[in-house]
Amino acid sequence: MNTVRRLVKNTSVLFLSQMIGYVLAFFYTLYSARYLGTSNFGIISFATAIAGLFAIFTDLGLSTLTIREVARDKTRTAKYLGNHGSIKLILSITTMALLVLYVNFGNFDYLTRFVVYIIGSSVIIDAFGGTFTSMFRAYEQMEYQSVAEIINAVIMFIGVLICVFMNYGVIGIAMIYLISSVVVMFYNFIMCSRNYGLIHFQFDFGFWKRLIYTAFPLAITSIFALISFKMNTIMLNMLTTNSVVGEYTAAFNLMQALIFIPTVYSTAVLPLFSKLYVDSRDMLDYSYKKSLKYLSLLSFPISMGTMVLARKIILFMYGPGYINTVPILELIIWALPAIFLSYILGTSIASINKQHETLKATFLCLILSTVGNYILIGLFSGIGAAMITILNEVSMVVFYIYIMHHAGYKVPVKDVVIKPLLASIVMGIVVYFLDLDLFVSVFVGIIVYVVMIFILRAFNTDDYNILKQLLPESMINKIEKIRKPKIKKGE
């Protein structure tokens, strides 16, 4: 299987599972948000945010390092699996203890504390299960991860429906997170054991020292980046009410749901980029630029379309009770293009062993997020949180581009920013003035955007050649026969 086909296979199975997951998530989020109301939905949102924040201490960059190193040399599988698993087990137990201490010493009511305990346990279990997921990614067998994500989505969907109809309340919905995490971890354990061998916890402290030292920049980068990303929800909880947190989270979740696209793609390309850095740096540069281009072509129209249709989207998904979410969504959705680019930039930086250079960038963004959220939330509430989210993500992209540029990998600005943005602006203007039904507007917007992409020549011959590699050979032969002029007999 050639490079393009392998990448598309892994991206496709992950994309399919994410699509199934997000379709189901759309419904169970809708049901839970309407059932719980803004206050209780704000408690769930805070619990997932704070638990996710603590969960970063369970990994410390070890998963990314394991994927990179095992992808380059499969003989290291047992050693990385055993030692990685041992470190993660210790970190998971420690992190859960710290989360419990934080919640008990904080100024939280009983219900909030109990929900954090439950969802925190589920997040910690998910984090430990990442040991097995790292192996799936290193071996580029993303189908196992895809099945796990579908299992999680199905359990969440059925569980939330049961909670809503049986009136189990916010505690019941929190328990579904925990049940799903346990089931998924056991599935990952079985699949990993069957394909790569049973995990044998190893305590090679010399190897641990090298692992932690090498992964340290990745760990600090992840910690700073995630704190920056989650800081808005946490500070909203501190400075405003549960209702404001719920309104902001409703918009934030819509934007965050779309992050599965760069997540899926970066997951698939990390082992590939890691190998290309060793085998063919010219091919890495080519793949890097194409990745930035394709993610931009996807993210800009999504942001423009969401901004124009924000009111219709909110009313359709959440109802009139979340009308205050509309201006927040109109603004925060513009963080999406920067997030799309930052994912592939961060993956590229890790694959070329430059992870230590991201420390300053992520630290500055953390300071910006902390100070900015405190000031802007105080002035503009949820709108202020959306403002600082955009500023933080754009700053991260600028820093990452500088690192890659300094390493010799430049960004084609015309293809990555100018053409997708121009096409999106035209699309937004057309959709705004037509003012059609939500789904009709989406359909019309797609047509206008595709037409503009061709007019601006954003999709060139090189892109067509890549597309040809994805088609079946029989179809390629038919296309070539049609394109080639008939040769007369005797010529």
Image (tube, grey):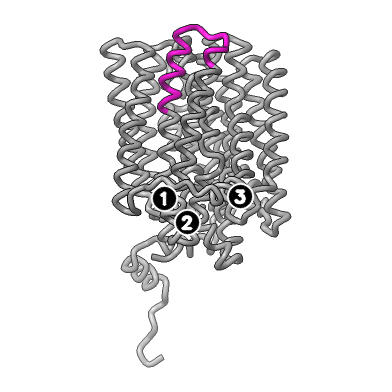
- Residue at 43% over, 63% down: 468
- Give the percent coordinates (x, y) of residue 262: 51, 43
Distance Cα–Cα, label 3 vs label 2: 14 Å
Q: Which residue is mark 1?
A: 135
Secondary structure category for the residue under label 1? helix
Quarter residue 23 falls in: top left
- Residue at 67% over, 51% down: 413
Main secondary-structure element of the magenta-colored stretch: helix
Residue 474 versus residue 338: which sits nearer the camera? 338
- Identify residue type, mark 3: Thr
Q: Is 309 rendered above or below residue 283? A: above
Range of residues picked out in magenta: 103-122
- Give the percent coordinates (x, y) of residue 192: 34, 48
Could you tell me if the residues under marks 3 and 1 are in contact, i.e. CB atoms within 8 Å?
no
Label 2 packing within 10 angstroms: few (<14), some (14-19), many (20+): many
- Residue at 55% over, 59% down: 287
Question: In this rendering, would 481 be left or right of 360?
Answer: left
- Give the percent coordinates (x, y) of residue 271: 49, 55
Q: Which residue is mark 2?
A: 70
Secondary structure category for the residue under label 2? helix
- Residue at 36% over, 41% down: 17
Specify the quadrant that holds the N terminus. Answer: bottom left
Evaluate whether residue 451 shows in this view: no
Sooner in the amino-acid sequence: mark 3 or mark 1: 1
Q: Nearest to the eye among marks 3 and 1: give it.
A: 3
Could you tell me if the residues under marks 2 and 1 are in contact, i.e. CB atoms within 8 Å?
yes
- Identify residue type, mark 1: Met
Q: Which residue is mark 3?
A: 214
Specify the quadrant that holds the C terminus. Answer: bottom left
Distance Cα–Cα, label 2 vs label 1: 8 Å
Sooner in the amino-acid sequence: mark 3 or mark 2: 2
- Identify residue type, mark 2: Val
